[in-house]
Amino acid sequence: MADIPDWKLVETNLGRAKQVPYEVGVLPIGATEAHNLHLPYGTDTYEVEAIAERACALAWDQGAEVLLLPAIPVSINENTLGFPWTLSYKPTTILQMLRDIVSSLEHHRLLKLLVLNGHGGNELQPFLRELFRETEVQLILVNWWTVDPEAFETIFEDPGEHADEMETSLMLHLRPDLVEMERADEGATREPHFTAMKEGWAWIARPWDKLTTNSGVGNPETATAEKGEQFIERVVEKIAGLIVEMANEPLDEWYPYESD
């Protein structure tokens, strides 16, 4: 018999899927954008897909009836379009895509959804607030890079924000064939002129082509595949644990809280 993963929607089939009472859906969201001069445009999508696949496989092995949905490979990059070939959806487009996917899941009575975000420009909390009263689907959002701050701080020497030591380490582990370290710049950024922005209490949608030289934020020089593997293992284990908890928790009026 073919080794087909029942937990992966794009690879399973109707004959198999009809036999599984799925409890939890997982929706990865990536991006297509410049990542310094050395990482592929699809870095965010490669990362979030790999983490989602490994977490779903681990959760399935632990008894969770989870369904991994296809990743969304383009997301909100309005402020990074200054770099060639970056692709972007408007925030309202992402909201409508989420609304339509959630509506489909509700139709099929899959009422627990983990939105696994892989792109820092996707500030999705307002969207989940808007969907809150529209659907029976219970939505939980995770930005995967925030899952294990202790691992983040101990594994990496000088993490930045974008195409940095952390992301480069992950890609050296996941897709070393797509990493060209000899092309990387140091990921330096320009300082804002306004004191309020320097102190962090004034915000703008940062124009990435003004903030950075070649879209990187953070020096990737100290990245290694070993660091990437260590971090992914820690993140996957914790996300798998969440999926198992979601699958096992009764979908009653108190979900996801403890009842009185």
Image (spheres, helix red, strand yellow):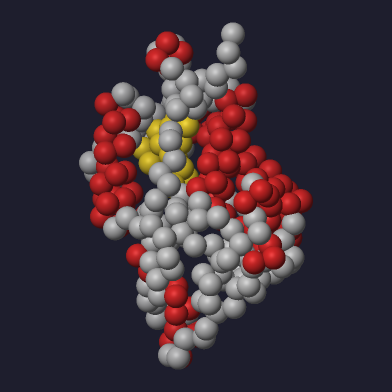
In the rendered image, the residue lying farthest to the top is 1
Q: Quadrant of residue 126?
A: bottom left
Residue 231 placed where, x, y %?
68, 50
Q: Is residue 191 above or below residue 138?
A: below
In the rendered image, the residue lying farthest to the left is 134
Residue under the point 43% across and 87% down: 196
Q: Is residue 183 or residue 168 the one in the foreground?
A: 183
Residue under the point 40% across and 75% down: 207
Residue under the point 40% across and 81% down: 202
Residue under the point 39% across and 29% down: 251
Q: Quadrant of the N terminus?
A: top right
Residue 137 placed where, x, y %?
33, 35
Residue 133 placed where, x, y %?
24, 43
Q: Quadrant of the C terminus?
A: top left
Q: Is residue 35 above or below residue 194?
A: above
28 relative position to 145: left or right:
left
